[in-house]
Image (cartoon, grey):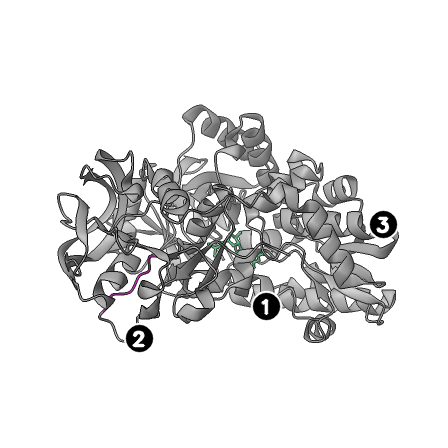
Amino acid sequence: MNPNPQIIILDAGGQYCHLEARKVRDLGVYAEVRASETPAEELSGARGLIISGGPSSVYDSGSPTVDPAIFSSGQAVLGICYGQQVMAHLLGGEVRRGEKGEYGMATLELDETNDPMFAGLSGRQQIWMSHRDLVGRVPEGFSVAGHTDTCAVAAIADRARRLYGVQFHPEVVHTARGLEYLANFVLKVCGCVPDWDPRHRVPLIEQEIRDCVGGRKVFFFVSGGVDSSVAFALATRALGEDRVRGVYVDTGLMRDGETDFVRRVRGLAVERAENEFLSVLAGVTDPEKKRHIIGEEFVLVQERVIEREGLMGHDWMLGQGTIYPDTIESGGTAKAALIKTHHNRVAGIQKLIASGRIVEPLRSFYKDEVRAVGRELGLPAELLNRHPFPGPGLAIRCLCSPNDAEVVASAEGHIIPVRSVGVQGDSRSYAPVLAIDALDTRRATDLTNRLTNVNRVIAPVEMRAPWSGMRVRACSLTADRLAKLRQADAVARCLSHESGYDAKVWQFPVILIPLGTAEAPDSVVLRPVDSVDGMTAQSVLMDGALLQAMCRRILEIEGVAGVFYDLTHKPPGTIEWE
Ligand code: XMP
C-alpha cells in the first residue's frame, strides 16, 4: 500500500501537473494527481493542495475549476499559473487578459517577506512564464509578493489562511529556484514529513504482488522497454521464476540487435513474427493504415501465444508495466493512455482486465521512480537508461510514398512531398516537410508558426546530389529499406552512446525518407529531442564534430543520398514522423 498522499495536485489540464507531482515526490513526500473538480471532502486527508497550471481562461465556459470549499478547509493551497488565477477568481479577485502574453524566461522581483512560503527567496531571479491572462486585483486578505516587468501580480499570499499563488512555473528547470518554492510550500507551509523513497518500496511492492496473485501465475508481454522489464523483474522476484512467464514478440520492426539484447539481458522467450508483419505491410504506404495493420497483427500474434500456452486458464493473470501517468486520463495525459491501449486490445486481455485478473506493480510510479526501483533490483544501466521506443517500431520511422513526386522550390527553401505527422491543437495532421538551407532552429520555429502548409522543418547536413537531382520515389516498407534504416539508426546510436550524447537527449529517432536519386533513393533524418514526458519536445542541435562523424558514416550506407536534421519543436511537429 502506498502512503496517503500528503500533497494532492489538482489537475487543471496543464501538461505540467505530473511534473509538479514528481517534484514533490523528489522532496521525499508522496503526492498524487486528482481531477481539479474533486470535492473538498475527498481531499481532506492531504496536508496541502496544489492547483496546477492549464491552457484555459477562467472566463471560458467549461474551463476547469476547483471546489471553492478547499479554500476554507484549513488546508494550505498553492495555485500555479492558471491555478493562481482560479484561486483569485473564486475568492473575489479579478483576472483579466494581459496586453501581451509572457512566454519563456522572465525576471521576477520578489519582495522581502517573512512568510515561510517565500523564505530565503527575496530579490531578482529567473523564472519561467507561460500565460496571457493575469490577476488584475488580488482577493481580500491577499498581498502581492512579487512582480515582473509585464506582470504586476506574479506571486500572492494570504498568510493567515495559508493560501498562495504564483504566476510562474516553479516546477520547470528554467525557474532557477523553483524547487525551493515547492520545498517551502510542502515542508514549511504544509509541514509535510518525508515518507517516500521509491527504492524502499521494493519489498512492499513484492508483497502486494504476492497478495494480488495468490496461488496463480503471471504472464507478461514484455517490450524490452524500461517499464515492462522492471515490472517483470519485480514479479519474478516476488513469485519465483516458475510462476512468471515473459514473452517478447519480434515484429521484425525492431532496431539492430534488439532481439539479442532482450534475450541476453532479460532472458525472455521470443515469439518470432517478422515475416508475418512484413507480409501484411507489403505495398502499404498510408501512415495511419500502417499503424492500424501493425496493431491488428500484434493482436493476432498475442492471441496465438495466449491460446498455445493456455494462458486464459484460471490459474493465470496478466502482468503489465503500466506507470502512473498512463492511469490518469485528463488534459495533458490522455494521449499517453491512448498510446498504451492499442497493445492491450486483445479480446483475451480485455477479458482478463474486466475480471480483475491483472497485476500492475508500477501503477503509482513515475518513470524516474521506475528507474530507481530497477536500480534497486540490480537491473543493468543499459536497460534502465534506454530511450523510449514506440511499439510499432521502425515502421513509423520508415516513410513510404504512393507515387513519384518532385521537390518544389519555394521562397523559404524546398518543399519535400512526403507526409509527416504533426500536432495542431489536439488532432494529428499530415503535411509535407520544408527543407531550409541552415541548421537554424529559431528560423524553423518562425516558419512553422507562419506557414500553414508545413508542420516540420529540416535542414541538410550533407547531400550527395544537388536539389535538382533529388526527388521522392514511390516505395513501401520492404526488408531492404528497413535494413537501411536499421543500419543508419545503429550508427547514430553507437556514436551518440560513445560520445555520451545519448544521456543528454530524451530520445533520438532516426528516420528514413524516400528522397534521393535513382542510385541512392533514400535519405536519413536525425531527430534528437529534449523533453520531459514526450508531450512537448524541443529540437536540440548537437556538437558539430559529432554530427559530421555521424553524417559521414551514414552516407557510407549504400543507397543513402543525404543526411538531414529535424529542427522542429513539438508542437507543431510530433517526435515521431508518423
Ligand atoms: P509523438 O510522436 O506523438 O510521440 O510526439 C510521443 C512519444 O510517444 C512515443 N510513441 C509511441 N509509443 N506506441 C508507443 O509505445 C506508439 O504507437 C507510439 N507513437 C509514439 C514516441 O516515441 C515518443 O516517445
* Secondary-structure class at tag 3: helix
Q: Amino acid at mark 3?
A: Glu
Report the mark closest to the observer, 3 or 1: 3
Q: Residue at x 26, y 36 (%)?
A: 126
Q: Earlier in the sequence, mark 3 or mark 2?
A: 2
3D distance between C-alphas at marks 3 and 2:
51 Å
Q: Which mark is residue 62?
A: 2
Q: How many marks can you see?
A: 3
Q: Earlier in the sequence, mark 3 or mark 1?
A: 3
Q: According to the image, label 1 marks what residue?
A: 292
Give x and y (percent) for residue 503: 52, 33
* Secondary-structure class at tag 2: loop
Q: Which mark is residue 241?
A: 3
Marks 3 and 1 close (CB-CB < 8 Å):
no
Q: Quadrant of residue 396?
A: bottom right
Q: Residues within 10 Å of mark 1 (few under 14, many from 20)?
A: few
Highlighted magenta segment, given as a residue range: 52-58
Q: Amino acid at mark 1?
A: His
- Residue 265 placement, left or right of 135: right
567 w.r.t. 16: above or below: above
3D distance between C-alphas at marks 3 and 1:
35 Å
Report the mark closest to the observer, 1 or 2: 2
Q: Quadrant of the N terminus?
A: bottom right
Q: Residues within 10 Å of mark 3 (few under 14, many from 20)?
A: few
Asked if disc 2 is less than 8 Å from ligand 1, the answer is: no
* Secondary-structure class at tag 1: helix
Q: Residues within 10 Å of mark 2 (few under 14, many from 20)?
A: few
In magenta stretch: residue 446: no
Q: Is residue 96 visible?
A: yes
Q: Quadrant of residue 79?
A: bottom left
Give x and y (percent) for residue 192: 45, 47
Give x and y (percent) for residue 567: 37, 43
